[in-house]
Amino acid sequence: MMDYEQRAKSVAECLMSYRRDGTGWKVCRKSNDVVVSWRPSSEFPGNVYKGDGIISGSPEKVWECLKPVPNGFRVKWDDNVKKFELLEQISLDVSVCRTVTPSAAMGIIAPRDFVDVILVKKYEDGSISSNATNILHPGCPPQSGYVRGFNHPCGCICVPMSGEPGKTQVLTFFQTDLGGLLPRSVVDSFFPSSMADFYSNLNKSVKSLRDV
């Protein structure tokens, strides 16, 4: 039996090291919402992508849109999340989930599914994060119709901005092996553009919550 909790905690440590280590990142996309950077991953033969953007909304509101729960807001606004299922609740803060993504890049990227252990962690400075990485789970073997992809340590961190209570810094880290035989150029162009869309859609979602 894999120690899911320990694996999830090591992801949180990994993301914190990415957050602190500013070396080697190369900017690949900038928009009004986000700066996306990348550097080679030490986890798999691909890249780790970092998004850094300011969202208009309190950390609580932003987290409401991001938190990894079934029937949460994420499925409604994130174009890359078609379905989100809870497979097993390990503890209060650790769960095993399956995420289904739609086809992308004009159909070049087929629908995929990912099985991850996810840790929700709060920090003393008021930051809150979701930390995920791939696992094998007996309750969810690969299924026909989906290419099984693998997330390496990835997640989102909502950071309160001192002096600006209505704004939140959102850091995201993606390093995903999409699986299948995709050309590298497709993968390298997909992530920066989808992350720019992610921040744009998150901003709109938080704004709609604020207007309620």
Image: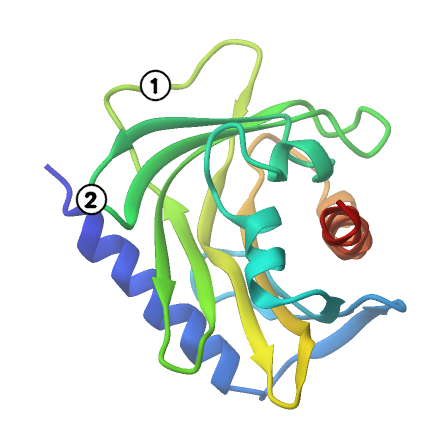
Q: Between marks 2 and 1, how big is the CA–CA gap?
A: 22 Å
Q: Is label 2 in a helix, a strand or a loop?
A: loop
Q: Residue at x 33, y 71 (%)?
A: 13
**Residue 46 can be seen in this image:** no
Q: Earlier in the sequence, mark 2 or mark 1?
A: 2
Residue at label 1? 141
Left or right, residue 117 beside residue 45: left
Q: Is 18 situated left or right of 38 in this image? A: left
- The label on residue 174 is none
What amino acid is labelled 2 in the image?
Ser
Foreground pick, 29 / 32: 32
Residue 184 location (% of width, % of height): 71, 47
Residue annotated with mark 2:
91
* Disc 2: CA contacts within 10 A as few (<14), some (14-19) or many (>=20): few
Across and down, in percent, residue 93 comes to 28, 50
Residue farthest along the right direction in this orientation: 32
The scheme the figure's colours follow is rainbow
Q: Residue at x 55, y 67 (%)?
A: 158
Q: Residue at x 37, y 67 (%)?
A: 122
